[in-house]
Amino acid sequence: MQTDQIMQQAAEAFEQYRRTKPAQRAAFLDAIATEITTRQDILVQVAGKETNLPEARLKGEIGRTAHQLRMFADLIKEGSWVEAVIDTKPGIRRMLMPVGPVIVFGASNFPFAFSTAGGDTASALAAGATVVIKGHSAHIRTSLLVFEAIQAAIAQSAMPTHTVQHVTGSYEIGKALVMHPNATGVGFTGSLQGGKALCNYAAARETPIPVFAEMSSVNPVVFLPDALQTRAAELAQTFAASITLGAGQFCTNPGLLVGLESDTFTAFQHMLASALQKTSPQKMLHEGIHRSFIEGRNRVLKHEATTVLEQPVIASDDTVAPSLAATSGAAFLAQPDLKEEVFGPHSLAIACKDKTELLAVLKSLKGQLTTSVMATDADLEAWQEVIDLQITLAGRIILNGAPTGVEVCAAMVHGGPYPATTDARYTSVGTAAIRRWVRPVCFQQFPDALLPDELKQDNPGGIWRLVDNQYTR
């Protein structure tokens, strides 16, 4: 099918879909969740063959995907997310409204939660936007099966036929979708190269549109002295598990481990290397990711400024074992290429000579999705500058925990300064993700009958609103 036809259908469907009541859209999202969970067995079977991911991981991801959909259904049923504001004396009212058709690119490393019916699609549909999905070539059969579930939900819920559409094919098709004048926004999770390309296309349009891309993060972890002194062995086990989780194919994988030069930090590194050595080799998602990981890791392990602490064992051509390298703070500051992400089960330990150098290492990094600190109360009192700096560095700051778990909840921020994402003001996980697909619209001196329900005088939905600077229902 031609791109023009797809995008025309998306625009026509939007004119109908944006007028649906919140309860109707909520029922639609619930129906998608039900259809996906009903198909769990076949989805796990097909996705396992396409991605090499284990059954438990895939079932968990399907559960997360259904949870996201139902979470957004609850959000829009409650209704306050539209941020309705009413100033009665001048007769001015404002709320958030959907932007139009949205393009969603499936992610390679999450065949369910960040792909066809993942967070981008769920949040866009909740907002009232129609969606065109570009299925990822690494798990195209899985993507098509999930789309079948969405189509079934569209029919059950009496939604416009083209509320959601699915396309496959070349890089050029994705570009054409982004460049089409009917597109109003883009959701993307993937490489820095891919995200930058989409941003360039969107900016080159006659009418530029936003691209909400999650792209690159090395997720630095700071190990403060007292924490290492009291629980180095525990932290080594925790971070060995984090580095190797899912063959390291998480955007929140802890790629940099930063501490002060000391016998304690050296001992921790050797404990971590020993723990990594005991893990089994794993298959990566597909050949392209495997090849990129080997190239990136070799670049670090063979670098003149690094020392190899855990040399990966080559089990077979299609599996990977974890690796760990070390360098000094001074060398890291002098070598920009050591700051680049290595997507897979690998981490680089950085030993800094003092607090000044440790802070300089953090300041030298670009924007991140996460940054973590392992600390006791005594550490936090003596190292407040680290926390202050981390707030400027990433979208999520973690105390005494590994970054690889991303909870789907209202408070979550899965975003950060560039190049972690293209816009640090937004998140791709949690209910706040809906704000990417809306814009504020102001109605001045409108009669009540012509206003959206959310702005009508009698508040038929009973939502929280800011009326003359007072929150009320």
Image (cartoon, grey):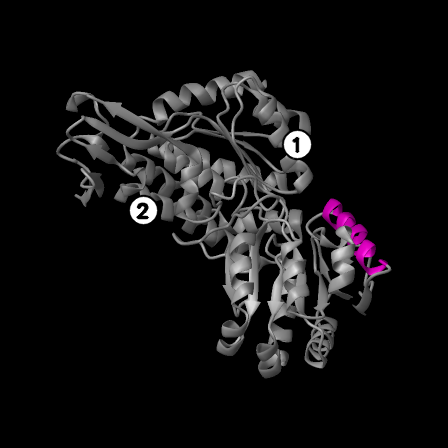
Q: Amino acid at mark 1?
A: Ala
Give left or right: position of 160 versus 302: left
| Residue at the limit of the structure toward the bottom, as seen here | 230
Q: Position of residue 5 (x, y in %)?
A: 53, 16
Q: Residue 420: say if magenta.
A: no
Question: Which region of the structure is painted magenta?
Answer: 287-303
Main SS class of the magenta portion in the image: helix
Q: Amino acid at mark 2?
A: Asp
The residue nearer to you, when weighing 41 against 102, is 102
The residue nearer to you, when weighing 255 against 238, is 255
Which of the two discs, 2 and 1, sits closer to the camera? 1
The residue nearer to you, when weighing 373 against 273, is 373
Q: Residues within 10 Å of mark 2 (few under 14, many from 20)?
A: some
- Can you identify the residue that label 2 sits on? 74
Q: Is residue 279 visible?
A: yes
Q: Which mark is residue 197?
A: 1
Counting residues from the N terminus, which is met first, the one under dot 2 or under dot 1? Answer: 2
